[in-house]
Image (cartoon, helix red, strand yellow):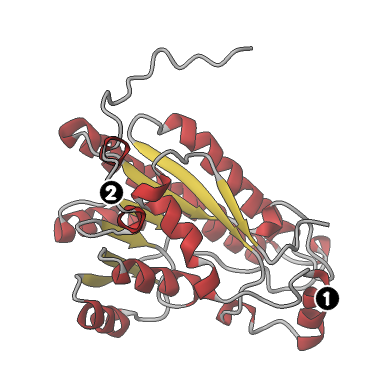
Amino acid sequence: MAKNFSNVEYPAPPPAHTKNESLQVLDLFKLNGKVASITGSSSGIGYALAEAFAQVGADVAIWYNSHDATGKAEALAKKYGVKVKAYKANVSSSDAVKQTIEQQIKDFGHLDIVVANAGIPWTKGAYIDQDDDKHFDQVVDVDLKGVGYVAKHAGRHFRERFEKEGKKGALVFTASMSGHIVNVPQFQATYNAAKAGVRHFAKSLAVEFAPFARVNSVSPGYINTEISDFVPQETQNKWWSLVPLGRGGETAELVGAYLFLASDAGSYATGTDIIVDGGYTLP
């Protein structure tokens, strides 16, 4: 059946840079005057994104749950001369997400970019039939439902802002290479399923939100952050043996994918998933 989007109203003018042949390519990646909200950004990938976006001019809203990021927010603001504030919220609560986004809009005026990055790993290392439901629920609540809540409430803001000002938003999800393949040697079926859901959710919302926001995802591989500290070195060595580049990635090697999708450089990208995994998913 052919696709038909004739009932969807799109903005008439193209992005300004498509009409300006003299614009420098680096300008497309700048975020001056934009506001980025990043969940799970007190450490790891999220904090690396917060710093990267601040470096290229964005004001940043940092989300944290158990580790207070107020000091980190103040340090980023001082270092890069932008506005940075920290917000405590549990993304597995729709009410908490709604209240946090509404507060950020009050504090910053609007949001241009929202990155749904918060996530937790499957730490049990056991067959799913030998575990209770608690950890299963936690992983699904944070990794999948949390992304859904962020998309819901950020999408509402993007829609309203487009209707009032004609400006579109950018929504980026942190999926995972685990949403593409089954990892070995560890067992993590629940995490894999949640991340596969995140990836397909982004593709589905790219169509649903097309008139007022772009929606994309990034699928990181094994990135060297605190989230993997619980994994035995023997298991990590097995991972590296299966990665063509032979090592884990650094957050600095990942942030460029998010910046592309969040900035004007990616203005024609929606429904895209960028895999950054050292080649793990290739064989």
Residue at position x 76%, y 54% in the image: 181
In the rendered image, which quarter is residue 88 located in? bottom left
The spot of residue 112 in percent (x, y) is 28, 50
SS type, badge 2: loop
The spot of residue 134 in percent (x, y) is 64, 65
Left or right: 201, with 188 as reference point: left
Residue at position x 76%, y 85% in the image: 232
Residue 116 seen by the camera: no
Q: How crowded is the residue under tag 2: few (<14 C-alpha within 10 Å), some, or many (20+)?
A: few
Task: Check disc 2 and report the residue beneath it.
Answer: 23
Residue at position x 54%, y 64% in the image: 119
Q: What residue type is labelled 2?
A: Leu
The spot of residue 46 in percent (x, y) is 44, 69
The Cα atoms of the two marked residues, 2 and 1, are separated by: 44 Å
Task: Check disc 1 and report the residue beneath it.
Answer: 241
Tag in front: 2 or 1: 2
In the rendered image, which quarter is residue 122 located in? bottom right
Q: Which amino acid does label 1 sit on?
A: Ser
Nearer-the-camera pick, 225 or 192:
225
Earlier in the chain: of badge 2 and badge 1, it is 2
Residue 245 seen by the camera: yes
In the rendered image, which quarter is residue 278 located in? bottom right
